Image (spheres, rainbow, N blue to C red):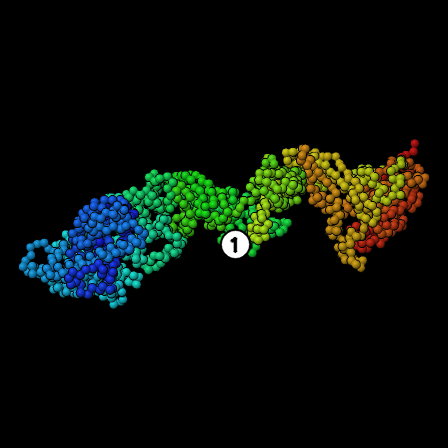
């Protein structure tokens, strides 16, 4: 069998192209390609070379439309035993190719050429083309037969010269054909084939053979007519041959003549095809196939068989009909031919048959059928134990990889994978699955493995280590789940062995292990945030909040969350990082010599990294690099040096693989096999590199750890800022963000501003004053619990510390460029300096409560500091000393009293605290104002609290009494008509507390509890909430004075220098004064005065009464056992006291028995107003308001 046969093959003249002498292979291929352009020579072009010696036997030669067709066989071909049967199999011409610079001796060239062509007996015409002759060779006048020199010239001139020579050869062949036909017609010829019997013929067989000789001669003449380009003459001879062959039952030659007639038909129609011609060709060739089958002789089956001609005829018909519309018919023909391969004897015939079948199936688009027969071809090659056959097998198998989806990357076109799947037509008539995963199909896994193993075996035999490495890499990477650990180790050894035979640095398009996928693009550190710059505004950073390295952020307003909008900004000269995950799903240790990012744009320097992966493991690594110039950066994947070969692992391929695993198209997910969690697909953003920018870096002097502060502690922290970039900083602004911004008291911004411009490498240090904030209840409990276990007790939570926002930028650039193109303004940057403040619980409140202390109150005759009290307002007369401000009379216990707010504090830390309390006092400036500026500040002795101990701090509260009781305090509950809207509630204490909230806050704000620990640690304790909680239950009694206050004094000899007891504020927390102790003597009439002060702004009418009781509490004035005689009025005293003034009433007492006595003043207020009822908490408007003063102790001495 012959390859590449068609119906038109019968009209092609075979010419052998032989290299003469030393001809470089590249030049030989070039010269051969020049010859291929002249496969068809029109008859009209050879008339000048044609000479008619006698009348041509080609009576119907189409000189105007006909042509001679050539088939150039490079290197020639061995003679065929079937040359008599089909003359087109003969080598009818020889063209020698000589390269004169390589073969300077032309005589030797001619000798070699003559020896070459004389080896072929069928040659009719021979020429030797000598290209590029030298000057000496051109000047050689010696005439050499059949040698044609092609002088050096340009390519068009050489092609024109070659075309002329081919026309000469065509004319010579035509004249030789005429001679042969004339000789065959006159003398006849004997034509034999291997099918003819070699035995002695009987007389009948001799007669039959003579008749067959005539038919065969006519058929052969017809063949030469076809070669001469005269289809009409050929058809006439074929018709005669068919009639004679039918009569002699010469089926084999009958089929040959019929086959020639079909070729003559097509040549006559000059390649035109229509349905009629197609049907005629189909009909005739079916008859050809049948007659070739009839010519089969059983006794010749072991020696020679016409089966090859039958199969060739089948292939010719299939090639003629080969198009999509007739795909089914052609497939049946090819299937029939494939079945006939079982009966072929010669392996080369099988090889050619399978090659032709594979080609035709490929032409139809049946890629997998074509791949199947290509594998049959490869197996035939592999049966031959030689290197060249292995190379052929490897090349054939490489053509099948696309159909089996195991092709090498070098053979994959640049078209998208979806387009690639549409090129093939599936056997069942359906298109391939339009999946993004086209390199893997699980249902073909076994067959794919077989194909790759065959490629690996053929590559090893062919001595191609790179092809072997590629096949082993694809086999291991794609089908590791189906390969045993021993097989995986074998493939790893094959990779290593192949790499040892390759030069260092060899690259392969097919990656092996590990699997690499993009893990994430880490956000830039806070120093690298980029901010758009508006040069028209002083606050150039405003309106363009930074979003890290991504221009798009899902939190921006008015934009959808579309990953395709992500754009990553990198800066020239600044290192960047990318996280990738590696997986080794195989059962051996994998050593990656180097791995680095694969950047297509060329403006990025990647840093290599070596990794060792244990069996069945995955690992996330950081790959880094530096952008070198502005422009886009395209990261396709990673470049890996593993198993001795450098490969490129693309992220897209692994993404397709993982998507295929999710769709069930891939055997398994290598990352899931290694225990890696399922990761969402991370796409590579659009990366652009911008010119260099300044880079400000910061660190806290003394260490970047947490700044440990106790609650309320104030401390300075020094922050060092340095310009680590290559561009100076010219603009800078500092602001605050985050929680607890109040903890930053001050920032020395001027220090930074004065250092501008901050040149590259320069640094500046700025102080920041911090104050520890107050911990909430949950944080305090957590801190206390941690301290119990000896921990530091940090209460720092994520996001609880403030941060410094430093916006900075470099030079603006050329002003003209900025005006013309605003986008050319270099952006600024934002540095986030988190103040890692860890607030520890310092002093903690345990509880707060109100305390009272009792001191006995006595009266005497010595002069007192209240001598001039009448000339002073009542509120001033009692405020000259600390004790005067603190002491008061308890109306129920008859004693002096002090009221304190006690704060119980706990120190859970390991340091000692010194507590100091200071109180700011307010003094009444006039009767119309509640308070004026601070008059004094009282300090109290420090209290020390050791670690893990408790202490109590007392805060006096008497200083905060209001100087008078005003109705405006309850104005919210008073209506415009003067009536009370809340009579049913009688001005409840709950409403009263709400009205006095401002006064309570003022009271609390004047109390300061400060602490100090060591030399540098100090702060202020926040006690507002504790004081407010303690005062909440008795706020009315603490803050508001009584409507009336009572006092007693001695009035001897009418002198006003008597002792007075003052109760100006309220019954249980008032201020008291202790008079000097002058003795009262029994049996003497002692004058007394009772003093009543009105603490409201309205006149009060009342009935006053005075009572004297003895030590047992019995009334000493009334009754049968009275021990005191009085002079004056002690009950039913009607008085009217003006607003904010006092009134006195005199009386005298005569004590009959010495001892201890108590004076008590009481009053019933007539027509009390709403203010008095609210203060007295009266629920009924008819209920009288009763006021009683504090008990006053009198010590009566007996007479001598």
Residue 198 vs residue 785: left or right? left
Counting from the top left corner in percent of width and height, residue 444 is at 33, 51
SS at mark 1?
loop
Q: Is residue 184 above or below residue 538?
A: below
Is residue 477 visible in the rendered image? The answer is no
Which residue is nearer to you in this view: 637 or 855?
637
What residue sits 56% from the left and 52% below the top?
823
Farthest residue, direction left: 203
Question: Image check: 141 left or right of 555?
Answer: left
Query: What residue is shown at x 73% (from left), y 46% (from top)?
Result: 1001
Q: Residue at x 67, y 35 (%)?
A: 1017
Identify the image quadrant of the N terminus.
bottom left
Q: Quadrant of residue 390?
A: top left
Q: Which sits in the foreground, 1184 or 381?
A: 381
- Where, quadrant-wise, is the C terminus in this rendering? top right
For label 1, the crowd category at 10 Å Cα-Cα, with few meaning under 14, some 14 to 19 and many 20 or more, is: few
Residue name at image x 73 percent, y 44 percent? 1005
User: Where in the figure is residue 984, as x and y percent of width and height?
Assistant: 76, 56
Which residue does the numbered mark 1 point to in the structure image? 561
Answer yes or no: is residue 849 visible: yes
In the rendering, at what x and y percent does residue 406 appear?
34, 50
């Amino acid at each position: 069998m012959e390859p590449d046969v068609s119906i038109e093959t019968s009209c092609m003249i075979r010419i052998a192209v032989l290299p003469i002498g030393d001809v470089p292979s590249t030049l030989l291929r070039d010269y051969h390609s020049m010859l291929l352009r002249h496969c068809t020579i029109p008859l009209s072009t050879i008339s000048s070379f044609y000479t008619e010696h006698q009348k041509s036997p080609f009576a119907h030669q189409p000189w105007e439309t006909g042509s001679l067709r050539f088939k150039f066989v490079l290197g020639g071909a061995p003679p065929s035993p079937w040359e008599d049967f089909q003359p087109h199999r003969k080598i009818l011409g020889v063209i020698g190719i000589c390269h004169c610079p390589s073969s300077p001796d032309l005589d030797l060239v001619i000798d070699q050429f003559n020896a070459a062509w004389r080896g072929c007996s069928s040659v009719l015409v021979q020429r030797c083309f000598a290209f590029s002759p030298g000057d000496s060779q051109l000047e050689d006048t010696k005439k050499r037969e059949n040698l044609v020199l092609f002088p050096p010239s340009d390519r068009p001139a050489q092609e024109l010269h070659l075309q002329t020579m081919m026309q000469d050869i065509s004319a010579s062949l035509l004249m030789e054909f005429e001679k042969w036909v004339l000789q065959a017609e006159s003398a006849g010829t004997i034509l034999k084939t291997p099918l003819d019997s070699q035995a002695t013929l009987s007389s009948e067989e001799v007669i039959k053979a003579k008749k067959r000789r005539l038919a065969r001669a006519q058929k052969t003449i017809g063949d030469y007519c076809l070669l001469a380009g005269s289809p009409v003459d050929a058809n006439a001879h074929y018709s005669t041959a068919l009639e004679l062959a039918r009569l002699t039952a010469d089926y084999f030659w009958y089929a040959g003549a019929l086959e020639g007639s079909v070729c003559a038909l097509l040549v006559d129609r000059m390649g035109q095809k229509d349905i009629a011609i197609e049907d005629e060709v189909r009909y005739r060739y079916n008859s050809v196939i049948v007659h070739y089958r009839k010519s089969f002789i059983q006794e010749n089956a072991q020696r020679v068989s016409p089966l090859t001609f039958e199969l060739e005829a089948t292939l010719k018909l299939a090639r003629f009909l080969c198009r999509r519309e007739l795909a089914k018919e052609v497939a049946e023909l090819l299937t029939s031919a494939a079945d006939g391969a079982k009966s072929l004897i010669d392996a080369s015939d099988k090889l050619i048959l399978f090659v032709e079948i594979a080609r035709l199936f490929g032409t139809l688009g049946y890629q997998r059928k074509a791949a199947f027969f290509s594998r049959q071809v490869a197996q035939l090659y592999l049966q031959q134990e030689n290197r060249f056959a292995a190379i052929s097998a490897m090349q054939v198998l490489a053509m099948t990889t696309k159909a089996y989806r195991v092709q090498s990357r070098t053979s994959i076109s640049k078209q998208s994978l979806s387009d690639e799947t549409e090129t093939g037509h599936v056997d069942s008539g359906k298109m391939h699955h339009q999946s993004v995963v086209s390199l893997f199909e699980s249902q073909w896994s076994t067959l794919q493995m077989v194909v790759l193993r065959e490629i690996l075996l053929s590559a090893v035999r062919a001595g191609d280590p790179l092809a072997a490495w590629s096949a082993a890499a694809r086999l291991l990477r794609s089908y590791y789940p189906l390969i045993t650990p021993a097989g995986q180790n074998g493939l790893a050894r094959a990779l290593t062995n192949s790499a040892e035979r390759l030069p260092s640095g060899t690259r392969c398009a097919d990656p092996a292990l590990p699997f690499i996928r993009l893990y994430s693009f880490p956000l830039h550190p806070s120093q690298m945030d980029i901010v758009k710059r508006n040069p028209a505004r002083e606050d150039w950073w405003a309106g363009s909040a930074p979003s890290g390295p991504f221009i798009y952020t899902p939190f921006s307003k008015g934009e959808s969350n579309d990953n395709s909008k992500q754009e990553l900004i990198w800066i020239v000269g600044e290192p960047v990082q990318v996280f990738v995950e590696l997986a080794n799903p195989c059962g051996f240790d994998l050593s990656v010599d180097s791995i680095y990012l694969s950047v297509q744009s060329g403006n990025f320097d990647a840093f290599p990294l070596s990794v060792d992966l244990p069996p069945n493991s995955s690992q996330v690594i950081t790959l880094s690099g530096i952008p070198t110039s502005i422009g886009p950066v395209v990261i396709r994947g990673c470049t890996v040096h593993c198993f001795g070969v450098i490969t490129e692992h693309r992220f897209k391929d692994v993404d397709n693989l993982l998507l295929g695993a999710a769709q069930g198209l891939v055997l398994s997910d290598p990352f899931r096999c290694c225990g890696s969690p399922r990761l969402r697909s991370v796409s590579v953003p659009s990366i652009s590199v911008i010119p260099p920018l300044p880079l400000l870096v910061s660190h806290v002097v003394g260490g970047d750890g947490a700044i440990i502060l106790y609650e309320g502690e104030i401390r300075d922290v020094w922050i060092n800022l340095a310009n680590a970039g290559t561009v100076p900083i010219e603009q800078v602004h500092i602001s605050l963000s985050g929680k607890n911004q109040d903890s930053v008291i001050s920032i020395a911004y001027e220090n930074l501003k004065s250092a501008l411009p901050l040149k590259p490498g320069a640094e500046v240090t700025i102080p920041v004053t911090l104050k520890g904030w107050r911990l909430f209840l949950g944080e305090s409990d957590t801190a206390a619990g941690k301290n119990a276990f000896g921990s530091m007790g940090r209460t720092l939570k994520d996001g609880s510390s403030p941060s410094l926002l430093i916006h900075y930028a470099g030079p603006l650039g050329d002003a003209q460029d900025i005006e013309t193109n605003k986008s050319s303004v270099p952006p600024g940057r934002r540095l986030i300096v988190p103040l890692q403040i860890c607030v520890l619980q310092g002093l903690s409140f345990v509880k707060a409560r109100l305390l009272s202390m009792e001191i006995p109150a006595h009266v005497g005759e010595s002069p007192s500091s209240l001598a001039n009290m009448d000339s002073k307002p009542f509120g001033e007369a009692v405020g000259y000393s600390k004790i005067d401000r603190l002491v008061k009379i308890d109306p129920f216990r008859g004693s002096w009293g002090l009221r304190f707010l006690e704060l119980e504090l706990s120190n859970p830390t390991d340091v000692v605290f010194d507590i100091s309390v200071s109180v700011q006092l307010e003094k009444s400036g006039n009767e119309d104002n509640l308070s004026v500026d601070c008059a004094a500040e009282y300090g109290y002795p420090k209290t020390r609290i050791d670690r893990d101990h408790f202490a109590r701090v007392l805060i006096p509260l008497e200083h905060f009494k209001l100087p008078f009781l005003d109705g405006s305090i309850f104005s919210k509950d008073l209506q415009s008509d003067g009536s009370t809207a809340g009579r049913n509630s009688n001005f409840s204490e709950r409403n009263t507390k709400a009205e006095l909230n401002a006064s309570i806050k003022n009271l609390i704000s004047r109390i300061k509890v400060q602490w100090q620990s060591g030399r540098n640690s100090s702060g202020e304790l926040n006690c507002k909430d504790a004081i407010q909680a303690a005062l909440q239950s008795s706020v009315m009694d603490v803050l508001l004075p009584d409507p009336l206050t009572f006092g007693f004094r001695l009035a001897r000899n009418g002198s006003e220098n008597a002792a007075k007891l003052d109760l100006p504020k309220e019954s249980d927390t008032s201020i008291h004064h202790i008079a000097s102790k002058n003795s009262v003597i029994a049996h003497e009439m002692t004058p007394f005065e009772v003093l009543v002060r009105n603490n409201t702004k309205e006149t009060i009418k009342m009935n006053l009464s005075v009572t004297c009781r003895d030590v047992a509490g019995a009334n000493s004035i009334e009754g049968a056992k009275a021990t005191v005689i009085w002079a004056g009025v002690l009950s039913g005293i009607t008085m009217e006291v003006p607003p904010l003034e006092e009134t006195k009433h005199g009386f005298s007492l005569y004590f009959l028995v010495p001892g201890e006595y108590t004076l008590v003043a009481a009053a019933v207020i007539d027509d009390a107003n709403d203010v008095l009822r609210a203060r007295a908490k009266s629920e009924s408007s008819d209920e009288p308001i009763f006021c009683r003063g504090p008990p006053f102790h009198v010590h009566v001495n007996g007479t001598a």
